[in-house]
Image (tube, rainbow, N blue to C red):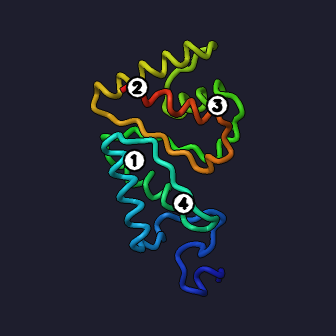
Amino acid sequence: MDVLSSLGLSEQPFRISPDPRFLYLSDQVREAMAKCEYMARNRTGPLYIYGPIGSGKTTILRRLYETLREDETFNVSMLISPNIKTSNAFLRLIMEDFGVKTERAYDRSLRSFERFLIDQYKAGRVPLLLVDEAQNMTRDTLRLIHYPLNVN
């Protein structure tokens, strides 16, 4: 007999990372989720969530990812702690996550990504990039996130 069955559990009770299924939907969490979903649906971005360690930012992000991924309107990509120092490497990471072919030259990759964003817009889809632990990103990589916002 193992520990799980002896305690009447169907799964491990403790994990290294938070499980969004067990997110307590306090009034504050509901409000944060509603604002995030509203901003995603209305293409209002970018959106930043900040708070102290352990306040539930990652869990909210994962719940949002699961919720919006089920909606056919969205093409959701989630990057966890991208500790990338150059804009080119970050652009390549984003493109690979969205399934867009990368080019050798940075400017060609940007143009390719622009075409992808325009095609998504024409198809009525909303590409959504969720980044956890973005405080580790450089100023240049953060600027890269703002650039595609001008495409649609």
C-alpha distance separating marks 4 and 2: 27 Å
Choose between 118 and 11: the one closer to the eye: 118
- Compare marks 2 and 3 and give the one earlier in the sequence: 2
Which circle, 3 or 1, is nearer the viewer? 3
- Compare marks 3 and 1 and give the one earlier in the sequence: 1
Query: Which amino acid is tagged 4?
Result: Lys
Q: Is residue 115 above or below residue 14?
A: above
- Number of numbered callouts drawn: 4
Left or right of 120? Residue 134 is right
- Compare marks 4 and 3 and give the one earlier in the sequence: 4
Residue carrying label 2: 117
Could you tell me residue 150's position as x and y percent?
A: 42, 26
Query: Which amino acid is tagged 2?
Result: Leu
C-alpha distance separating marks 4 and 1: 18 Å
Left or right of 71? Residue 146 is right
Callout 1: SS: helix
Query: Which amino acid is tagged 1?
Result: Arg
